[in-house]
Image (spheres, coloured by chain):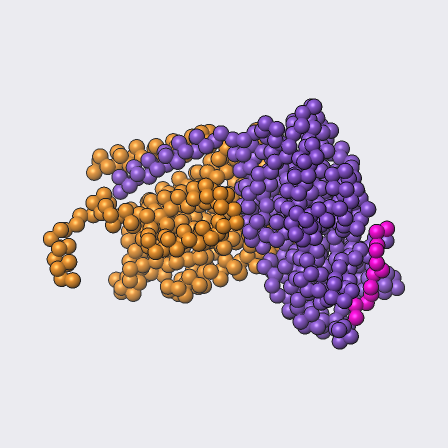
Chain colours: A orange, B purple
Amino acid sequence: MEKVKQKDLILYSGLIILGLAAPYLFSAFKVQLTYLCVLIVLAMTWNLQGGEMGYNTFGNILFYGLGMYLTASIQVGMFFPLAEWTESGGEKTFVHTTSQYFQGIGVGLLVSAIVPAIIAGAIGYAILGLRGHYFAICTLGLGIAAGEIAGGIEIIGAGQGFTTPPFPAEIVDTEARGKFFYFLSFALLVGTFMFVKYIYGSRFRLILNAIRDNEDKAEAMGIQTMKYKIVGWMCSAFFCGLAGGIMGGLIGYIDSTDVAFDGREMGVFMVLMAILGGKGTLWGPVIGATLFHFFKEGLWTLILGWQYVALGVLIVVIVVYFPEGLMGWLREKYPERFGEVIDEKDRKAQVELK
Amino acid sequence: MNKIAKLFVTFISAITLALVSFTSSFAKVEGEYIVLGSAISLTGKYSSNGVHTQNGYNMAVDRINKMGGVEVQGKKYKFEIIYYDDESNPKRAAQLAERLIKQDGVHYMLGPYSSGLTKAIAPVTEKYKIPMVEANGASRSLFTKGYKYLFAVLSPANQYLEVAIDLAVEKNGGKGVKIAQAFEQDAFSQDVRLGILDAAKRTGSEIIIDDKLPKELNDMAATLAKVKAVKPDVLVVSGHTKGALTAIRQISEMKVDVPMLAMTHCDAAKLSKQHGKKSEFALCASQWHKNLSYKDKFFGSGKKYAKDFQKEFGYDPPYQSAESSAALLVFKDAFERANSFDRDAVRDALVDTEMQTFYGNIKFGPGGQNVAKPMILFQVRCKGDDCENRVVAPTKWASDKFYHPIPKWSDRS
């Protein structure tokens, strides 16, 4: 047992060193690497619902978008009148000083983690009683509704969009912005991973699994399923909000339906990535998101105009050939590597029975 | 579990190696080529206008290269453009701009299509101090952010339909009019709306319907039903190509009678071809029309440009293509005056631009917008079944008189 832990340690420290060195090794790819971190976070948090709890949600995009708007609004609102900043036309120019910028984004990120979590709690209380596809459809509506509502609120730019504060001009190094957002998202990734890993070793995960496998039985066992479902969703919302906040700052421009509440892309991608890697596993979403991102960045531009067709084919291939994802497929092929022992006698007996 | 983790590490390292070997990026100037970069909407909701933009760019690149290219320090260079598809999505556009600059080593950018996407790209080009000449981002807020490397060859969006309101007031004997308006929820259309609000205030006009339309604009029947009920003097609609098509389709289906219909993007939507007589009398704001009398030595006059474009791509050039072509002319001129590939020298040369192209005069204001060119209005007019866009304002170029009011549907054959 001790030995395994030591191996783990080597693996994790290796990955962290790689993560820390990445922006220096591949300086030109910083933005893509930042995206990768955020995508992994989104896939991992989606996996908590879709994979562990068995509640396929399309609503996590709501928290992502919310985090984006909140961070930007607070970053501006702390120092300047928000309404004048976002006013269509925006005749006045406001410039953040370096300390204002970082203070703003710090407070903004804090709020963008807490508020979505609270909202997830409130919405969860209302809709987590729904099960199966009813829940999925209901959450699909959440993201779409949020996008349309945000597109009508003048103070956050409405249809005009919201230009987030530019990186302070006093920092002359053009690489600084990329590094800042990379390390921010990498820290978020590490935090999320540690949190999810902690959950994987806890009773909480077992309860989520029990809800997935048979919610009625879980309830009969005396588990207050509603409470755990809500807490699970709040955890996801917390990290989704943070991811959104970081992305808003990185992209520099928030559009209600195309960037923030982007259910058509991000909302679908997070589900796809988790399923590709294998839902219900710790590493599945990480691998899924990484593969997906490389597929997207590598092939997308080679097949201009056909990329969404390719994506559609990819979805079909995943669902048909890897319904359990890559991790599930590997698990089936090499069960012993996952620590599963097959009782040959029992297997034979079952084959004979058939 | 651990073996899997190892597998994962192996996978990561393989990718790492691949990336490192791939980082051999392009240079800003490669051999005899000056490399420009652009993210263009080839798919998604702006795909038709994205293609108009790309055709405009390509046409100008071919023409300039054929006619000797760009001369810098006594050496001739040719233009080359690296394109990516931004999928009409601002997030993707910002990411691609970063990619063009960091990975492909592009030092000069051409704009994308639409204000929203330009808004997403401008912070990136600004950060890396990359001069960007854009031809399709007209939103006023682009020019008030203090961007130093952004240059737009077109007039700002709020000017698009102000003239139309002035015209309506003039026809109404100088008294204010009743305006019904519906705009798509996007940066450009909302800016056009601001222009109307200003004009309404100035002329004492009243806005009686002020609707917002969704982004994937396929239906505006609710707005039109209201218009039928309250009978405004002017109906203003803006929502890119889809907005123009939807408006004409439903106005003719529902037989909505308004004395004046003002729109944007009629020529990009090929309204007069697609809807023929149904679109007659629609008044359209345009950045350019082929009948204008501007000239340059690469494309000759607007008419000549239209003819060559038609030959090359098989359709009449909308102004989106014309202004995109003009962006290349501006870049060529700036490179030659800077006589250098230094980004800041090129940027300074761009600031001092003062030239005439077939598309119009170009001179950049302090915010980067083109201040030397007025907007024009044209009206769709038909002879038999043959419909055409005729310039009606400003009077200097007007080929036809403005027809007002629009006859009722019951009187139209």
For the point 30% across and 56% down, which residue is it?
A209
Residue sitting farthest toward the front = B311
For the point 80% across and 62% down, which residue is it?
B205
> Which image quarter: residue B247?
bottom right
- B344 relative to A56, above or below: above
Q: Please, what is the dominant secondary structure of the magenta stretch?
A: loop
Looking at the image, residue B254 sits to the left or right of residue A203; the answer is right
Q: Nearer the viewer, residue A238 or B19?
A: B19
Where is the N terminus of chain A found, in terms of image quarters? Answer: top left
Give the magenta part as a residue range: B396-407
As for residue A105 lying within the magenta part, the answer is no
How far from the left and from the top, in percent, is residue A256?
57, 53
For the point 66% across and 66% down, which residue is it?
B249
Looking at the image, residue B53 sits to the left or right of residue A244; the answer is right
Looking at the image, residue B125 sits to the left or right of residue A206; the answer is right
Where is the C terminus of chain A found, in terms of image quarters? Answer: bottom left
